[in-house]
Image: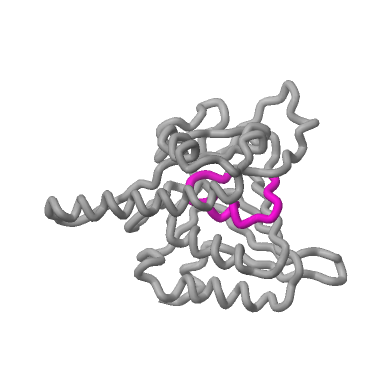
Amino acid sequence: MSREANKFWRINPANAAENTAAELILYGDISSYPSWWADDITPQQFNEDLSALGDVSEITVRINSGGGDLFAATAIFTRLKSHKATITVIIDGWACSAATVIAMAGDVIKIPAAGAFMIHDPTLTLWGRFEAADFDKFKNELITAKNCIINAYAMKTGKTKDEISALMTAETWYTGEEVVEAGFCDKVLFSENVENKKFAIAADVSRYKNAPKNLFAPLPESGVKNSNQTKKAFL
């Protein structure tokens, strides 16, 4: 499998002449096949792409994603968090599930007032035959995954782990203004333009339990389908 075929990101280099920062574009599902814990191609390609930017001082991460593979998201979070550049995250539409883990790498996180942000407990998709003992292992994996996510949120928000755990279990949805007030993001964009207006994000939210119906417009027939592929754990 070629590395390029497995990419779900785009990186645009900085342009000194136009005074623009380097950009990491994350639109759509954060996915990797088979998955990052068993895939030595995709994470290596991401590292190479990020390293190829060279000695940049600023990286803008633009997110419009309903989530996907937790392992991929965690790896991107770690690489961005450890990068010496100033990281500005801009949530262009929605950041949900695993996409919110990546967002936590931002030194500053911005979201439009009409945007959406959602956190929930990690889930597991399985195919195959399993014994009873396997499910104990799966449960422990999910608990560990949740604790890892909680740590990322706690560093940003200052909330206690119990507070964050309860919000995740409830599958909590925020508007742009609400998520800034909750401490997950830092700045609301375009708030002066939302009064008395209605907005809808075109997205597939069928995998989520509590998605607010008034926030999402149905996808056109040619729209992106839910691409939950075989994964060990995803958000």
Q: Position of residue 36 (x, y in %)?
A: 41, 66
In-front residue for pair 6/44: 44
Q: Quadrant of residue 192?
A: top right
Q: Is residue 118 left or right of residue 189?
A: left
Against 26, residue 44 (above or below) is: below
Against 44, residue 101 (above or below) is: above
Residue 160 on the magenta segment? no
The residue under the point 15% across, 56% down is 129
Q: Is residue 115 left or right of residue 33?
A: right
Of all residues shown, which one is farthest toward the right? Answer: 17
Of all residues shown, which one is farthest toward the left? Answer: 131
In-front residue for pair 203/56: 56
Q: Position of residue 133 (x, y in %)?
A: 15, 54
Q: Quadrant of residue 82?
A: bottom right
The residue under the point 60% across, 48% down is 156
Q: Is residue 185 left or right of residue 170?
A: right
**Residue 220 visible in the current orientation:** no
Residue 107 on the magenta segment? yes
Q: Position of residue 18 (x, y in %)?
A: 86, 66
Q: How is the image coloured?
A: one colour
Q: Quadrant of residue 113?
A: top right
Q: Where does the magenta region start and end?
A: 95-110
In-front residue for pair 42/131: 131
The residue under the point 27% across, 49% down is 139
Against 26, residue 181 (above or below) is: above
**Residue 228 visible in the current orientation:** yes
The residue under the point 60% across, 52% down is 103
Q: Position of residue 105 (x, y in %)?
A: 61, 57
